[in-house]
């Protein structure tokens, strides 16, 4: 059975591991969720890389694929891991590009560490639309602890968006934990607002790397 490690520091990784197991039953999902160092995985690229190296060392070279289910690690360290451990395959959570042709404003929910990277700056340039970045550094911990309420979600987003909020927007989740509150965000923004996370795109990459038919869980010939 194909062995895939999912690495993260919180519920974002747990949610993706759940989805991976459901969509690809031929995969043995190994959860490496470093709850103890969750803050360090969101703090800076240096601290995140150090934590990841220590946590993943027992699995490198022994599994079919390692998933970095963390946007900061992906945009700052995926190339590092691929260069350093050439006999191990890695895939990460890239910043999702909106795929509609309608030029709506894009709102990105993320953390300060991600927003300060060169990769994030280049990502905004590639979107070629009006964008608004909302930094929500308090949310990952609250999501992990089950303390983020729908009322707080509404109050915080109202403060940032105010009267700007309308249905002519698209929303990108650039923090894995935010996928855990996707239903609450959908209720806030409205059903007509498209919300993107990195799950489906990462699943497609996994299928391609492991030669699996996505959504079916059968090994291709």
Image: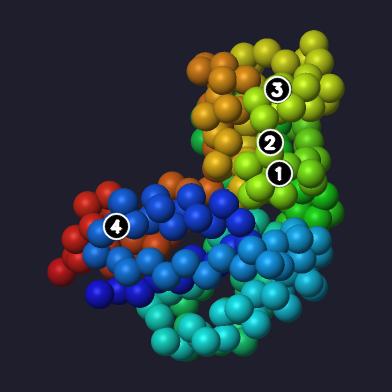
Please identify the residue farthest to the left as the structure is shown.
Answer: 221
Label 3 and label 4: CA atoms lie apart by 35 Å
Decide: marks 3, 2 in contact (CB < 8 A)? no
For the C terminus, the image quarter is bottom left
Of the two numbered discs 1 and 3 on the same chain, state the one appearing first in sequence.
1
Residue at mark 1: 142
Residue 31, position as x, y percentages in the image:
47, 67
Decide: marks 1, 2 in contact (CB < 8 A)? yes
Residue at mark 3: 151
Residue 104, position as x, y percentages in the image:
64, 23
Label 3 and label 2: CA atoms lie apart by 8 Å
Decide: marks 1, 3 in contact (CB < 8 A)? no
Would residue 167 be found to the left or right of residue 43 on screen?
left
Residue at mark 4: 24
Residue 106, by quadrant, is top right
Q: Secondary structure at mark 1?
A: helix
Task: Please name whichever residue, 77 or 112, is drawn nearer the observer in this view of the structure.
Answer: 112
Of the two numbered discs 1 and 2 on the same chain, state the one appearing first in sequence.
1
Dot 3: few (<14), some (14–19), or many (≥20) neighbours within 10 Å?
few
Label 2 and label 4: CA atoms lie apart by 30 Å
- Please say whether residue 124 is visible from this viewpoint: no
Residue 117, position as x, y percentages in the image:
80, 57
- Please say whether residue 159 is visible from this viewpoint: yes
Residue 54, by quadrant, is bottom right
Residue at mark 2: 148
Residue located 61% across and 78% down the image: 55
Of the two numbered discs 3 and 4 on the same chain, state the one appearing first in sequence.
4
Label 1 and label 3: CA atoms lie apart by 13 Å
Q: Secondary structure at mark 2?
A: loop
Decide: marks 2, 4 in contact (CB < 8 A)? no
Q: Secondary structure at mark 3?
A: helix
């Amino acid at each position: 059975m194909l062995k895939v490690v999912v690495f993260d520091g919180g519920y974002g990784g747990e949610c993706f591991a759940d989805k991976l197991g459901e969509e690809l039953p031929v995969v043995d999902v190994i959860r490496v969720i470093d709850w103890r160092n969750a803050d360090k995985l969101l703090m800076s690229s240096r601290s995140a890389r150090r934590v990841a190296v220590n946590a993943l060392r027992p699995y490198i070279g022994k599994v079919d694929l390692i998933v970095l289910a963390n946007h900061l690690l992906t945009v700052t360290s995926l190339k590092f891991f691929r260069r350093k451990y050439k006999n191990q395959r890695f895939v990460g959570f890239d910043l999702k590009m909106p795929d509609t042709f309608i030029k709506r404003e894009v709102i990105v929910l993320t953390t300060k560490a991600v927003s300060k990277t060169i990769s994030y700056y280049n990502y905004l340039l590639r979107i070629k639309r009006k964008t608004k970045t909302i930094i929500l550094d308090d949310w990952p911990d609250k999501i992990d602890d089950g303390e983020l309420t729908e009322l707080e979600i509404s109050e915080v987003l109202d403060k940032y968006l105010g009267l700007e909020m309308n249905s002519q927007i698209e929303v990108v989740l650039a923090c894995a934990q935010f996928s855990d509150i996707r239903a609450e965000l959908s209720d806030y923004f409205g059903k007509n607002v498209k919300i993107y996370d990195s799950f489906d795109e990462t699943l497609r990459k996994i299928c391609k790397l492991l030669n699996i038919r996505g959504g079916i869980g059968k090994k291709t010939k």
